[in-house]
Amino acid sequence: MRGVKLQVKGNWAHFKKPETNNNPLSHDFITKTALIGIIGAVLGIERKPMKEFFPLLSENLRYGVCINNSVQKQSWGFTLRSLTEIIDKDSKRPSKAPKQMEFIKHPDYEIIVGLVDKSDADAERLFEQFIKAIIEEKACYTPVLGLHNCPAELIFINEGKLEYQTNGNFKTKGFVSSKHQPEICDLVNLRLGFDKIPTYQNNAFWSLPEKYVQVVYPSEGKSITVSGEHYNYEHDNEIKWYLI
């Protein structure tokens, strides 16, 4: 499987958990669906045609994330107002209470994106165009980390081959599934995070509940040793990846 490694970072990020509509909370790190949105922004695909590419790329791409720093979250309050209220200064509508939103501070990720062998032709074309744009440091629209006021910086690291392994012990700095078996000695002085993240979005921009995956992850660039399925990446000798 062909893959590419990127660094994705910014000042702030918000990857909304759909079950927290009133005071939105954020997933702990960039989700697969958010990454697909970044691909659309880089390639300049408008919202309407991008609807059809979300399920396509959800099926044909695999991704893994290494969190380079600690996961730090802060809540901020925003008073949401309509454009009519802003224009009509004499509006008698009562002021709305601030809405709290949770943000990730200084997100910094190392990401592997792989294209499944024998993928759909459209998926291959989009993947090729995305890699080319990242290498050339070009983007049609500003890529964001979940929200438009959270711009992202994308840095190409390298490109190489990913080889799937059905089982085995491996060391990783990225997330793994809850089905992987950890080495107990690794857990003594290591703090792990847990999250349930979306991996598939349909053409109505809806993340299917049955496609969520429970993951466990280290942070601050630390590694864990586990047993289970994984991928070898040709540029990483000791560190392996779990991709979803």
Image: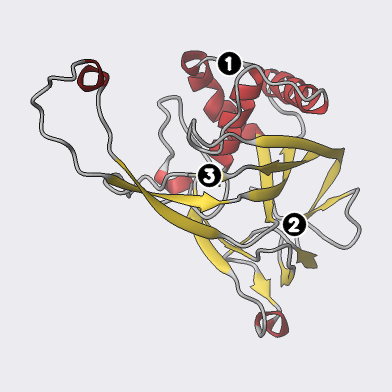
Q: In what element is the residue under mark 3?
A: strand
CA gap, disc 3 to disc 1?
21 Å
How far separated are the C-alphas under marks 2 and 1?
32 Å
* Circle 3/circle 1 CB separation < 8 Å: no
Q: Residue at x 60, y 29 (%)?
A: 143
Quarter of the image with the N terminus is: top right
* Pick the front one: 41 or 64: 41
Say which of marks 2 and 1 sits in front.
1
For the point 90% across and 48% down, which residue is it?
A: 234
Q: Can the viewer see residue 115 in this picture?
A: no
At label 3, which amino acid type do we have? Ala
Foreground residue, 220 or 225? Answer: 220
Q: Which residue is mark 1?
A: 45
> What percent of the width, then of the height, locates residue 113?
72, 40
The mark lying in front, picked from 3 and 1, is 3
**At 79% across and 67% down in the image, what residue appears?**
171
Mark 1 burial class by Cα count in 10 Å: few <14, some 14-19, many 20+ = some
Q: x and y percent of residue 200 in the render?
A: 51, 38
- Residue 206 visible in the displayed image: yes
Residue placed under numbered mark 2 in the picture: 230
Q: Amino acid at mark 1?
A: Ile
Residue 116, by quadrant, is top right
Q: Is residue 44 left or right of residue 52?
A: right
Label 2: element kind: strand
Up the image or down, 94 lies above or below 77; here it is above
Nearer to us of marks 3 and 2 is 3
User: What's the amino acid at mark 2?
Assistant: His
**Residue topped by disc 3:** 13
Residue 165 appears left or right of 107: right
Pointers 3 and 2 in contact (C-beta within 8 Å): no
